[in-house]
Image: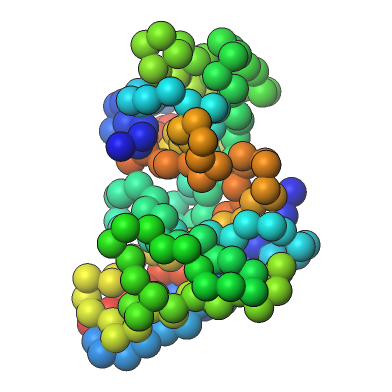
């Protein structure tokens, strides 16, 4: 399966610290996306990185992609309590336009 | 971007009954999808809702259990039929433009079957 797997499953940090989440996948991809889900809500798209890109930034978010290792990382710098949520990576295999979601990392940021 | 609403936001149902979930998008979109998310788990794609034709179901999901309608480019419904407690889950609607990878999600419908 193309499903990405996030690591760690759960992460608990203090406000102001950085949070790093990782995603590994199995086969070649067109792109990789990260989504956030606040408790009991829908998913919100955060950032997309294409297979020919190695790093991308958006505000306090930094995403890296290593296609040789089939892995990606999401870094949230200077975390805030409002960053508390589940974070999912989603990959779409070449030839498919529908992303497959991983199990997610549950992030708790303590004020 | 698209703004998506779902109704109902939550419901508690008795086993053997059916529930229809509505998904409304604020603009015309090419693709609409229905997902299921069980507590603490990932999203599982149920089907792609096709405008004017039958939905495309993923392995493990069938039309008799999850009939889907999509009468136009802004609206879709998912029915969970003959419910059992195993159907307790969050059901999410999403939309995307063909050729655009980003999906926009509704807030979800939290279903509890007793």
Relative placement, left or right, of A18 versus B72 is left
Examine the rendering and report whether any part of residue B101 can be seen. Answer: yes
Task: Give B103 or A105, whichever is nearer the viewer.
Answer: B103
Give x and y (percent) for residue B81: 35, 83
Give x and y (percent) for residue B85: 22, 76
When the figure is inspected, residue B89 is found, relative to residue A46, above or below; the finding is below
When the figure is inspected, residue B44 is found, relative to residue A19, above or below; the finding is below
Examine the rendering and report whether any part of residue A10 can be seen. Answer: no
Going 38% across and 58% down the picture, which residue do you hit?
B58
Relative placement, left or right, of B38 versus B52 is left
Number of numbered callouts drawn: 0
Going 56% across and 10% down the picture, which residue do you hit?
A54
When the figure is inspected, residue B44 is found, relative to residue A102, above or below; the finding is below
Relative placement, left or right, of B73 versus A64 is right
Visual colour scheme: rainbow
Q: Residue furthest right?
A: B27
Can you say which quadrant of the picture contains the N terminus of chain A? top left
Image quadrant where residue B69 sits: bottom right
Image quadrant where residue B15 sits: bottom left
Going 29% across and 70% down the picture, which residue do you hit?
B88
Give x and y (percent) for residue B57: 41, 63
Give x and y (percent) for residue A50: 59, 22
């Amino acid at each position: 399966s193309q499903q990405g797997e996030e690591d760690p499953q759960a992460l608990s940090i203090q406000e102001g610290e950085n949070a790093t989440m990782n995603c590994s996948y199995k086969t070649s991809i067109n792109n990789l996306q990260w989504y956030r889900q606040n408790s009991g809500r829908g998913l919100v798209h955060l950032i997309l990185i294409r297979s020919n890109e190695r790093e991308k930034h958006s505000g306090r978010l930094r995403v890296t992609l290593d296609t040789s290792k089939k892995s990606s990382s999401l870094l949230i710098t200077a975390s805030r309590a409002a960053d508390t949520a589940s974070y999912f990576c989603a990959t779409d295999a070449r030839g498919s336009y529908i992303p497959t979601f991983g199990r997610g990392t549950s992030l708790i940021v303590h004020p | 971007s698209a703004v998506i609403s779902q109704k109902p936001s939550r419901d508690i149902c008795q086993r053997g009954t059916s529930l229809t979930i509505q998904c409304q998008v604020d603009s015309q979109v090419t693709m609409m999808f229905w997902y299921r998310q069980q507590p603490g788990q990932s999203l599982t794609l149920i089907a792609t809702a096709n405008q004017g034709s039958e939905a495309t179901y993923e392995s493990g999901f069938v039309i008799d259990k999850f009939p889907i309608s999509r009468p136009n480019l802004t609206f879709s419904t998912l029915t969970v039929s003959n419910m059992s407690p195993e159907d307790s889950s969050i059901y999410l609607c999403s939309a995307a433009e063909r050729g655009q990878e980003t999906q926009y999600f509704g807030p979800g419908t939290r279903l509890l079957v007793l």
